[in-house]
């Protein structure tokens, strides 16, 4: 039985159950693929707040009720069209996860692409279905530039610079075994394996001293800073795109001048 449920527009919900004492399971069910829409993000943030302030501290596990997808990321066109989406909707959820005062584990039962992959990286631990799903940051394929926190979370958490490169510049798709080998995830399996991990690592006990969240804020301080209001925000991202456009215009002008000089028979440089 769910201990609570929160609706996601237009026809989804987030439910929270308690599969073992002080272990809370947040399950996303927003068809078809758990896109990170404003309604989804609002519901997710509220679920985290409810557990933090109304239930005994323990361990939080997030997963999907849709077997094929953990999350397929943003509705990118809608996200960039909505003023303040990143600063007011997406980043507060990421910051909440990243600095959450309890251990928080992403149970990746299906695909996690782009923003869905990034959301999983904000968690403390990641477990992945060994038989289904890929992890992929495909921004280079869809023409979506990286904002500061999107890049820094991988820079801080992925062990190898080569893996960091392959994730973004090759849009490499990692199955579970590859992701485990590269240190992107921490284990293979489903709910039973996650609960065994929680028990073996005594994760519930880690919250007793009250410093769990503040320790994570220090550990991942660059990404935390990038997620703060005024940092890594829509305005900063828009300026980055504008700067890129200005540089491109200058580069094109240089090429056009070179072409003109070449046609005139003059030295090319």
Image: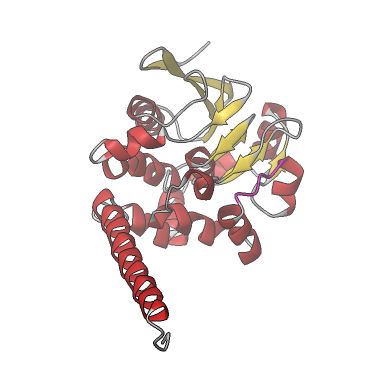
The reply, left or right, for residue 207 in relation to residue 134 is left
The reply, left or right, for residue 109 in relation to residue 34 is right
**Residue 179 vertical placement versus 72 (above, below):** below
Instruction: Name the residue rendered at 39%, 54% in the picture.
Output: 147
Is 172 in the magenta? yes
Residue placed furthest toward the front: 264
Q: Quadrant of the C terminus?
A: bottom left
Instruction: Name the residue rendered at 35%, 57% in the picture.
Output: 226
- Majority secondary structure in the magenta region: loop
Is 170 in the magenta? no
Instruction: Name the residue rendered at 44%, 30% in the picture.
Output: 56
The colour scheme applied to this rendered structure is secondary structure
Q: Quadrant of residue 35?
A: top left
Judge by depth and name the residue closer to the eye, 219 or 30. Answer: 30
Q: Position of residue 109 (x, y in %)?
A: 64, 29
Q: Position of residue 23 (x, y in %)?
A: 56, 29
**Residue 81 vertical placement versus 124 (above, below):** above
Asked if residue 141 can be seen in this view, the reply is: yes
Judge by depth and name the residue closer to the eye, 5 or 257. Answer: 257
The reply, left or right, for residue 205 in relation to residue 129 is left
Query: Magenta part of the protein: which range?
Result: 171-175
Q: Position of residue 155 (x, y in %)?
A: 52, 61
The reply, left or right, for residue 84 in relation to residue 220 is left
Q: Position of residue 219 (x, y in %)?
A: 47, 60
Instruction: Name the residue rendered at 40%, 77% in the picture.
Output: 263
Q: How many numbered callouts?
A: 0
Judge by depth and name the residue closer to the eye, 116 or 253. Answer: 253
Asked if residue 231 can be seen in this view, the reply is: no
Judge by depth and name the residue closer to the eye, 182 or 212. Answer: 182
């Amino acid at each position: 039985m769910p201990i609570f449920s929160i609706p996601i527009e237009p026809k989804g919900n987030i439910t929270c159950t308690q599969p073992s004492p002080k272990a809370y399971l947040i399950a996303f069910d927003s068809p078809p693929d758990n896109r990170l829409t404003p309604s989804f993000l609002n519901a997710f943030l509220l679920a985290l707040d409810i557990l933090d302030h109304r239930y005994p501290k323990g361990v939080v596990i997030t997963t999907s009720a849709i077997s094929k997808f953990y999350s397929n990321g943003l509705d990118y066109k809608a996200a960039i069209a909505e003023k303040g989406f990143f600063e007011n909707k997406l980043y507060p959820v990421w910051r909440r996860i990243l600095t959450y005062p309890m251990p928080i584990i992403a149970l990746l039962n299906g695909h996690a692409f782009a923003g869905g992959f990034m959301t999983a990286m904000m968690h403390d631990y990641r477990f992945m279905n060994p038989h289904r799903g890929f992890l992929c940051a495909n921004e280079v394929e869809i023409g979506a530039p990286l904002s500061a926190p999107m890049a820094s979370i991988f820079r801080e958490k992925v062990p190898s610079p080569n893996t960091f490169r392959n994730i973004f510049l090759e849009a490499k798709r990692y199955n579970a075994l590859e992701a485990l080998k590269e240190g992107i995830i921490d284990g293979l399996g489903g709910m039973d394996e996650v609960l065994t991990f929680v028990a073996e690592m005594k994760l519930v006990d880690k919250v007793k001293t009250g410093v769990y969240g503040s320790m994570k804020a220090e550990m991942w301080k660059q990404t935390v800073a990038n997620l703060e209001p005024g940092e890594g925000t829509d305005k900063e991202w828009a300026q980055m795109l504008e700067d890129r456009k200005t540089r491109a215009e200058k580069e094109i002008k240089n090429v056009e001048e070179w072409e003109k000089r070449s046609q005139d028979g003059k030295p090319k440089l």
